[in-house]
Image (cartoon, coloured by chain):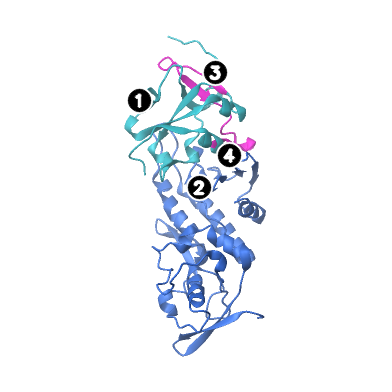
Chain colours: A cyan, B blue
Amino acid sequence: MSFQIEEVNDDGILYYRVHKTYIREGEVIPGAFRERGEGEEKGMSCDWNKYSSGELCRKRAQNPEDNGIVESKVLPIRECKMPVIHHPYDDNQSHSNVKNLGEKLELTENRRILIGLFSTWTIKIENAP
Amino acid sequence: MGDNKIINMGIESDSLKIPLVNFGKKQAIANASSPHVWDIENDYFPDSIDSPFTVSDFLMPKIYGDTLPHSKSRKESYIASLWVAKGGKELELDVQEIGIFNRSIKVEVKGNIICEIDSALNILEKNINESKYILELGDDFDGEGSIGYSVETWTRAILFISKQFNYFFKKFNIILPSPKIFHGPDGSIDMLWKQNEKIVLLNFPFNEIEKITFSASNANGDNVKGYLMADSNSDSLLFSIASFL
């Protein structure tokens, strides 16, 4: 079953899994915010709140108990030149990508800083270092 | 030596002369940014001081001569604080006990010494040691398919930052705020300075032919970004970091 691609609304919320290794002294490190995949698939993989929740996002992890969830509104991300694109999978209608996060030659380190600043905990992980 | 003061320290047969030089606000700020300097848990805060000093009250010693190293370490700060506490009167200290002869710190990984840094840069050393956790992160460490981190990348990053800090300290007598060192995207290493609402992030790439990139942001949305090569002597970058924070 294929889901239709939709326009992610500006006041939507994105959920993002943060593995415990990306948490140091209780804070999410900038390295947590990273793109995965290649070509059209490339992007920071998030779940859109229209079709997901923080808890559902967490359950999609290989080991949910090793992951926390942070959330961020869509608009401030877009305002920082990072498009948010709905990219549903057959088993996850909410899946969306934040683009242009990791282009080395475009000097995007500040975007990782900004996403970190926009993000707040939805589900905080207890067993992080 | 102008208005420098002299402390005679009784050590065995010789007295070492230590002129105290006021380095002014610049040096005081550099030290204030390293909170551990005044951490009571460390043994650098002497019992004989009744009330805590503020850094701005502080005279930083500079040590001359062949016997003692020419550097400004926390241990030298300890001597200066004792001297100030006693109203600038003659002071006797067991220099061996204080350990003032420890001039450099060796940075090791897996039994190999990869570099030495001046003992004054001990906060950097602490942060480097804390970053060794990165070397334990193998492929798929996060369950999302991320690649692991190589000793070579970590070592190149540490050599780079150590070289820059040593250079800056020796050339300008300033101890820069030390970054926290974390694992970055795609096998790269991040160096993060965070102070109040100011953030500097420097990314050291997995691939050694790629450039090191950095970005500095503050609460007003001001942003500075750029890149450099690992073999450059980038005092301009470090000046930027020091002035930004």
Q: Earlier in the sequence, mark 1 or mark 4?
A: 1
Foreground: disc 3 or disc 2: 3
User: Mark 4 to mark 3: distance in Å?
Assistant: 25 Å
Q: Amino acid at mark 3?
A: Asn
The percent coordinates of residue B62 (x first, y second) are 58, 74
Foreground mark, 4 or 3, reads 3
Residue depicted at 50% across the width and 18% down the height: A87
* Residue B27 falls inside the magenta stretch: no
Q: Are marks 4 and 3 on the same chain?
A: yes
Instruction: Check if mark 2's residue and mark 1's residue have beta carbons within 8 Å.
Output: no
Q: Are marks 1 and 3 in contact (CB under 8 Å)?
A: no
Residue B52: numbered disc: none
Residue A109: assigned label: 4
Provide the residue designation for mark 2: B153
CA–CA distance between discs 1 and 4? 29 Å
Q: Nearer the viewer, residue A124 or B224?
A: A124
Question: Does A85 lie within the magenta span?
Answer: yes
Q: Chain of mark 1?
A: A
Single out the mark in the foreground, 2 or 1.
1
Q: Does the rendering let one see residue B141? A: no
Q: Specify whether disc 3 shares its chain with disc 2.
A: no
> Are circles 1 and 4 on residues that touch, CB within 8 Å?
no
Whether pointer 4 and pointer 3 mark residues with C-beta atoms closer than 8 Å, the reply is no
Residue under label 3, please give it: A9
Tell me which amino acid carries mark 1: Lys
Mark 4 closeness class: few <14, some 14–19, many ≥20 residues within 10 Å: many
Whichever of labels 4 and 3 marks the residue nearer the N terminus, that label is 3
